[in-house]
Image (spheres, rainbow, N blue to C red):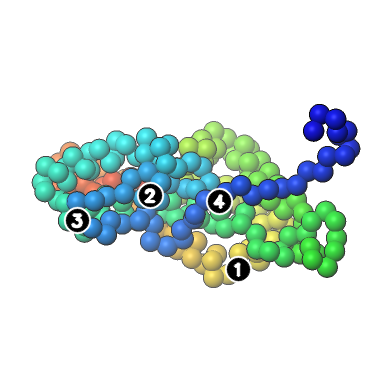
């Protein structure tokens, strides 16, 4: 390699690994009594940011309090433990971003045109999408950018970002809509409306956390807090 000239080196994109991404039934619920998944195995974090030990550290306060109460009150059946890692709209809305950057074979053109790589998406589609995303968030300010970087999707910042992206580069956003298809877009909007609902319910019920100590009620409050991204 040391004897080669720079112009003799041909760079190729190599996929070294992949992140599994679930669009349904996340986080993964326990299937057995007295056993609960944590970290990567529970799918409680977006695969676009971090997982494993990082996800465990972020969720450690919630998990430690919930597991402590489950042990204290003998709530160790699978249906009880499933309340610890329940549906989180703030996590489910992240799935569309992963899907938007997971192009199907033949959708994207490469730099060199041939009958095998003449897709309808431009070669720099992903770069343009990410540039549009961060340009919109940068314009909207820290209150929008910070939750995204911390992987805590919130209804207000997310809505502002999506609108900003549409105004910033409508052509790229329209390409994304055609790329993922109407069924997936509709599914995403259902998760987004759930995110709005969880946000409203969080503000209504969170003042009752110290007043009602019931296991199920506490897990509902956890779900509303983390499901709204306001953790």
Label 2, label 3: how many angstroms apart (C-alpha)? 16 Å
Rounded to the nearest angstrom, the CA distance separating label 4 from label 2 is 15 Å
Q: Which residue is mark 4?
A: 18
Reading the chain from its start, which is encountered first: label 1 or label 4?
Answer: 4
Q: Is residue 118 above or below residue 156?
A: below
Q: Quadrant of residue 59?
A: top left
Q: Mark 2 highlights which residue?
A: 41
> Element type at marker 2?
helix
Give the mark nearer the N terminus: 3 vs 1.
3
Could you tell which of marks 3 and 4 lies nearer the N-terminus?
4
Residue 77 percent location from the top left of the image: 17, 56
Mark 2 residue crowding within 10 angstroms, few (<14) / some (14–19) / many (20+)? few
Q: Secondary structure at mark 3?
A: loop
Up-down relation of residue 94 to residue 53 (above or below):
below
Farthest residue in the left direction? Answer: 73
- Using the rendered view, name the quadrant where residue 58 is placed: top left
C-alpha distance separating marks 3 and 4:
31 Å
Q: Residue at x 57, y 58 (%)?
A: 99
Q: Position of residue 28 (x, y in %)?
A: 35, 56
């Amino acid at each position: 390699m040391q004897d080669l000239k720079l112009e003799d080196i041909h760079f190729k994109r190599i996929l070294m690994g992949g992140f599994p991404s679930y669009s349904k039934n996340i986080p993964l619920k326990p299937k057995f009594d007295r056993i609960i998944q944590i970290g990567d195995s529970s799918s409680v974090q977006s695969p676009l940011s971090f997982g494993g030990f990082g996800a465990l550290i972020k969720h450690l306060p919630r998990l430690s309090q919930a597991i402590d109460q489950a042990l204290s009150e003998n709530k160790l059946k699978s249906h009880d433990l499933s309340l610890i890692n329940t549906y989180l709209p703030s996590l489910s809305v992240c799935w569309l971003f992963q899907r938007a950057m997971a192009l199907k074979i033949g959708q994207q053109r490469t730099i060199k045109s041939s009958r095998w790589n003449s897709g309808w998406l431009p070669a720099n589609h992903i770069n343009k999408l990410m540039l549009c995303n961060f340009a919109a968030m940068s314009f909207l300010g820290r209150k929008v950018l910070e939750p995204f970087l911390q992987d805590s999707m919130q209804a207000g910042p997310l809505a502002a970002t999506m609108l900003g992206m549409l105004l910033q580069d409508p052509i790229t956003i329209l390409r994304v809509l055609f790329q993922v298809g109407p069924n997936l877009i509709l599914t995403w909007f259902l998760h987004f409306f759930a995110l709005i609902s969880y946000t409203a319910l969080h503000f209504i019920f969170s003042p009752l956390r110290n007043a009602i100590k019931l296991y199920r009620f506490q897990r509902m409050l956890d779900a509303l807090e983390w499901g709204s991204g306001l953790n």
